């Protein structure tokens, strides 16, 4: 009994050690990282206190993010301002953003606009895009869509995705510029390819309704799915509307089964005539073979439609023409060949 207790105690001890060792190693790693960040913060502070603009900005960012130093927006503002006063564009932009959001300082759109403008004038793409946003929404001054378009264009030309998406929106709605679906698609495409969810959903809409591009429901679904995967609610709602009802799929499946049965019966009749009776049965038997082939082709199309989003394909119209043509051929053969043949069949005593 005592030996079993010892074994159990030993097992518990081994399990505890197995769990404690990784935890202790993680603690050591975190402690070492914190020590490294604190040393970096001290070195940065030493350079910042000597008036180094880059160090001033980096120290402000450390306070803003809480890296190596306690998170402190007031201190972040103080050091960003020191760097911004020396014309450091990223610090000017960050300072403007903090005034815009009221972080560490009272919210002030006018002051935000002033600092963001300084950064934008130095070709900072984020600042140019933010400036376009403020002019578009009338923050820090009256609305000015022409100025918004100008600043968005500068940032978009440098590949900034939010500005590209915003530019697409302005062309789509004709705000600050003449309405142009083609330009809207072009800018949405650029932003969407960089992963902008709003642009992806907007591009899905353009493909779904044929705005600026050839209508392509499969293309619409592809872009909607990309946006939905990033949590875009508009894209999720659009996908739900594009999804075909289950009833339609059941009908298509039923048509596929009926076509398969009809086709097999017609072809079995032909096979029986050839291989059993050794006689094809004249031209009517040949026409019945064509009827069976039409039924099978129709079954194949219906089955494909029940398992794919064919209605969203650019070949949707061709698909429907082919289906209706096959139905027409089958109907003509059945009425003009099969039914008359049945009426002429003699009755056996």
Image: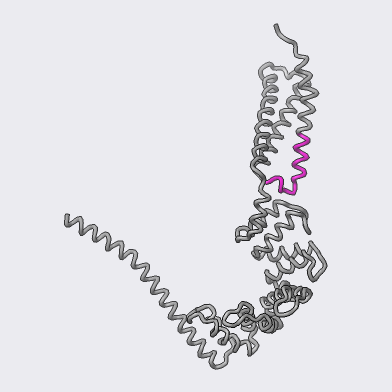
Q: Is residue 51 above or below residue 201?
A: below
Residue 117, position as x, y percentages in the image: 70, 82
Judge from the rendering whether residue 82 lies leftward or rightward of residue 218; answer left or right.
left
Task: Check the image and name the residue furthest to the left.
Answer: 2
Q: Considering the image in quadrants, where does the N terminus appear?
A: bottom left
Residue 246, position as x, y percentages in the image: 64, 42
Residue 177, position as x, y percentages in the image: 81, 70
Count the numbered circles shown. 0
Q: Is residue 111 above or below residue 217?
A: below
Task: Check the image and name the residue furthest to the front.
Answer: 106
Q: Is residue 310 above or below residue 151?
A: above
Residue at the spot x=63%, y=89% of the render? 85
Q: Is residue 105 above or below residue 315?
A: below
Residue 113, quarter of the rendered image: bottom right
Residue at the spot x=73%, y=19% of the render? 280
Q: Which residues are magenta?
A: 309-326
Query: Magenta segment: does it hold 105?
Result: no
Work out whether residue 304 can be spotted: no
Residue 3, position as x, y percentages in the image: 18, 56
Residue 92, quarter of the rendered image: bottom right
Residue 11, quarter of the rendered image: bottom left
Q: Main secondary structure of the magenta part?
A: helix
Instruction: Please tell me which residue lies in front, 218 or 148.
Output: 148
Residue at the spot x=65%, y=88% of the render? 87
Work out whether residue 193 can be spotted: yes
Q: Considering the image in quadrants, where does the C terminus appear?
A: top right
């Amino acid at each position: 009994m005592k030996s079993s207790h010892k074994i159990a105690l030993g097992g518990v001890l081994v399990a505890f050690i197995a769990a404690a060792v990784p935890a202790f190693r993680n603690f050591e790693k975190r402690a070492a990282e914190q020590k490294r960040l604190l040393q970096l913060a001290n070195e940065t502070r030493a350079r910042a206190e000597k008036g180094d603009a880059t160090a001033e900005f980096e120290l402000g960012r450390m306070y803003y993010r809480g890296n190596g130093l306690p998170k402190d927006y007031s201190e972040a503002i103080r050091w960003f301002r020191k760097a911004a006063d020396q014309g450091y564009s990223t610090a000017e932009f960050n300072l403007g953003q903090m005034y815009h959001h009221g972080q560490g300082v009272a919210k002030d759109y006018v002051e935000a606009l002033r600092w963001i403008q300084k950064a934008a004038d130095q070709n900072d793409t984020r600042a140019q895009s933010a400036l376009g946003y403020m002019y578009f929404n009338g923050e820090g001054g009256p609305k000015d869509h022409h100025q918004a378009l100008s600043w968005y264009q500068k940032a978009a030309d440098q590949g900034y995705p939010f500005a590209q998406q915003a530019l697409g929106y302005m062309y789509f709605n004709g705000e600050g510029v003449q309405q142009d679906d083609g330009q809207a698609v072009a800018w949405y495409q650029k932003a969407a390819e960089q992963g902008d969810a709003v642009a992806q959903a907007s591009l899905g809409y353009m493909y779904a309704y044929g705005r600026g591009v050839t209508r392509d429901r499969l293309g619409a679904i592809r872009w909607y799915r990309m946006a939905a995967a990033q949590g875009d609610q508009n894209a999720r709602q659009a996908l739900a509307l594009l999804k075909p009802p289950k009833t339609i799929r059941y009908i298509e499946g039923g048509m596929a089964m009926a076509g398969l049965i009809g086709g097999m019966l017609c072809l079995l009749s032909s096979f029986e005539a050839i291989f059993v009776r050794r006689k094809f049965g004249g031209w009517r038997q040949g026409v019945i073979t064509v009827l069976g082939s039409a039924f099978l082709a129709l079954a194949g199309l219906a089955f494909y439609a029940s398992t794919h989003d064919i209605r969203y394909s650019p070949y949707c119209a061709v698909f429907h023409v082919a289906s209706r043509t096959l139905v027409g051929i089958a109907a003509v053969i059945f009425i003009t060949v099969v039914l008359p043949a049945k009426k002429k069949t003699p009755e056996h005593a």
